[in-house]
Amino acid sequence: MRGTGTLIRDFVLAATLVGLSACAGQVRGTGDLGLVIERAAGRVQVVETTGRTALGAISGLGDLSHASVVYSRDERHAFVFGRDGGLSKVDLLSERLVKRVVQAGNSIGGAISQDGTLVAVSNYQPGGVRIFDARTLDLVADIPAVYGDGTTRSKVVGLVDAPGQRFVFSLFDAGEIWVVDLSDPSAPAIRRFRDIGRQPYDGLITPDGRYYLAGLFGEDGVALLDLWNLDAGVRRILDGYGRGEEPLPVYKMPHLEGWAAAGDQLFLPAVGRHEVLVIDRRDWREVGRIAVAGQPVFVEARPDGRQVWVNFAHPDNDVVQVIDVATRQVVRTLHPGKGVMHLEFTPRGEQVWLSLRDENRVEVYDTRTLQRIATLPADKPSGIFLTARAHRIGL
Amino acid sequence: MRGTGTLIRDFVLAATLVGLSACAGQVRGTGDLGLVIERAAGRVQVVETTGRTALGAISGLGDLSHASVVYSRDERHAFVFGRDGGLSKVDLLSERLVKRVVQAGNSIGGAISQDGTLVAVSNYQPGGVRIFDARTLDLVADIPAVYGDGTTRSKVVGLVDAPGQRFVFSLFDAGEIWVVDLSDPSAPAIRRFRDIGRQPYDGLITPDGRYYLAGLFGEDGVALLDLWNLDAGVRRILDGYGRGEEPLPVYKMPHLEGWAAAGDQLFLPAVGRHEVLVIDRRDWREVGRIAVAGQPVFVEARPDGRQVWVNFAHPDNDVVQVIDVATRQVVRTLHPGKGVMHLEFTPRGEQVWLSLRDENRVEVYDTRTLQRIATLPADKPSGIFLTARAHRIGL
């Protein structure tokens, strides 16, 4: 019966493979998933926010310092932008690297088009934006950030997606903002805005996708572009905002992604100062300042806009403060541990996830009780990105 | 060898089942899925918005007239609220009915708690709200809508979720708004607001979860409750809004879920009139009226707030109009076909899905070109609900 035994084993093996091949990956919803960047390890952890656990990890993503992530519209795949020019597509269900291309020498983040078909990467070297097919990662369009005599290329920063299959970004060296319409990916329609201010170092778009703002490194103030009215051009707001007023050393230029919109108010980190600035979104004027524990880095609004959470630059990066928006008061100072790098809210705001780089862990807090409800080990975690970002504009 | 043959067949069968049971359903992301209600058939179609196709159908859901849907936080399961008191939990990946309970005699929609653990149903008969475990559909709490001498029960309408594990709803017969905190599901903390106006017939909560509004059937005006300041109580806004000013027969009381928030403006259907009203969200005053093709039913804002799409009551329910928010002008009148029942935008707004009950089809439009890009057959489709709702407050 030995032959039959082998036969049976082979049949069983084959049948099992047939069964399993029907599901290369877990059968589960993807709305409660996320990635935690493990910077030094060149790895991402796949986490879920319902049970608050780690599901697995995906390695081989290269240099993930300053890495960021966007998601496919079905929330299954993530596109990870590394500092080394690497663009990696990972599958959260099978927990594997689908494809990786090193598309430039030095990059700083990216975005995904409104319809989810195009992924754009913002490059320092060579300066420009490259557009890839979200399915295959094939190059679709190359947009060199040329300026001046047309031979020089600028570093590109502050790349965001905008409604109408557009991308918006800033040219650090050229002092320009470009709006690119990719309705026809084979023929990008570029609209350039020149002389917007010296050295735009970062940009953001309001959650409704209407206003693009670029922070200036070379002078004070912020450049504002209304995407509903491009003909009005770029105007200057917040003239006092920036390095000019800066009496303290700036340990870290705050990211504009760290700005928070809560109702009609915009909360943003003062550059170098131990303050969070409050701006009225209707006229872009400063309406208040809130004293905080250090130089703010990320100023994030809970999705319902009732709280704003703030982390800080060294030497205060072991502290997180919670601001009550209604009273503009700091209502809690938390000391989660050393090296708080990033914070991310669940989409309906009941949880916030914190990465503690120097403690090698991620912590989850209940935003109502302000109590810690989970701790996950992680290797020098930095950015935390939840799949709900797939459904939002400008992320 | 006959015995061995049977043995082999059994092994193969068993092994295959083992393999398949590892994936009871498709392996795919759930962020681009949705359900289309097929009212007469008591069935829902599972659709996806990336390829714009139907994936399958789930039957046996009872009377789905006026049915609505909420989603689990992982976007895998849907909770379907039928008019017959039925609460059905369906799995979008395996396309099957997981569980169905008939929890009342007559119901009108429901909501899911901020943390996704509790599902609430709004009941006419017996009047009240019942709370169920989202995992098992076991009854967790029963909240009878008693009023007056404490023996009478009111119909409950306008049930929504609110931040802080709360539900808010209105008592039609009692003229009350209740805010229920379910932080401790075994002991719901109820706060009652009396004399809010006669016969509240529907309610909504602003997208940030701060303001609850109840429309009044028995008199003009709207009841407003600021959930950030419950002690301030309910105030009356929009005194002119309602039946009082009504010179025309009201074919259908518009649903307040049909109100649209776009920037600082709220667009809402005038009751009975061929107008869309524009309200300033900062002071709740009417700032404009837009003439439209009929009595508006749903007035929905594209997620970026640049467009508002409107459908109409009989006899104008074959028309859909598109309003440009910047100019407050109707920029397009579409004639998709008879019986336009509902419209739903994809989360980043590039598509809108329309249900055409009397044409037995669903149509998908590109919101930039305003061209139809897909048509799907459906049996008397009514509501369309995409999984992105899982990540939003008050839906």
Image: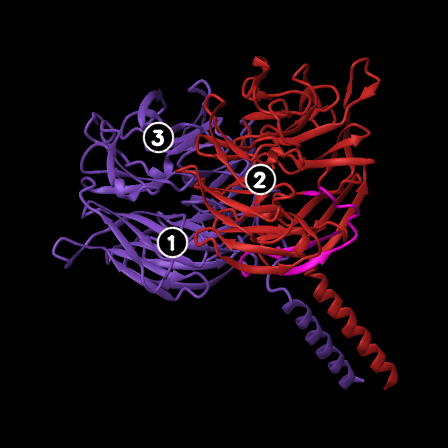
Chain colours: A purple, B red
The percent position of residue A114, horizontal first and vertical second, equals 44, 52
Residue closest to the far left:
A149
Rendered image: mark on residue B294: 2
Q: Which residue is mark 3?
A: A268
Viewer-proximal residue among B253 and A107:
B253
- Is A172 magenta? The answer is no
Q: Do discs 2 and 3 belong to a common subunit?
A: no
Magenta residues span: B43-68
Instruction: Establish if B106 lies above or below A248.
Output: below
Q: Earlier in the sequence, mark 1 or mark 3?
A: 1
**In the image, what residue occupies the spot 80% across and 42% down?**
B101
Drawn side of residue B39 relative to residue A264, left or right: right
Chain for numbered disc 3: A
Chain for numbered disc 2: B
Quadrant assignment for the N terminus of chain B = bottom right
Mark 1 and mark 3: Cα distance apart in space:
25 Å
Please tell me whether mark 2 sits on a helix, a strand or a loop.
loop
Quadrant assignment for the C terminus of chain B = top right
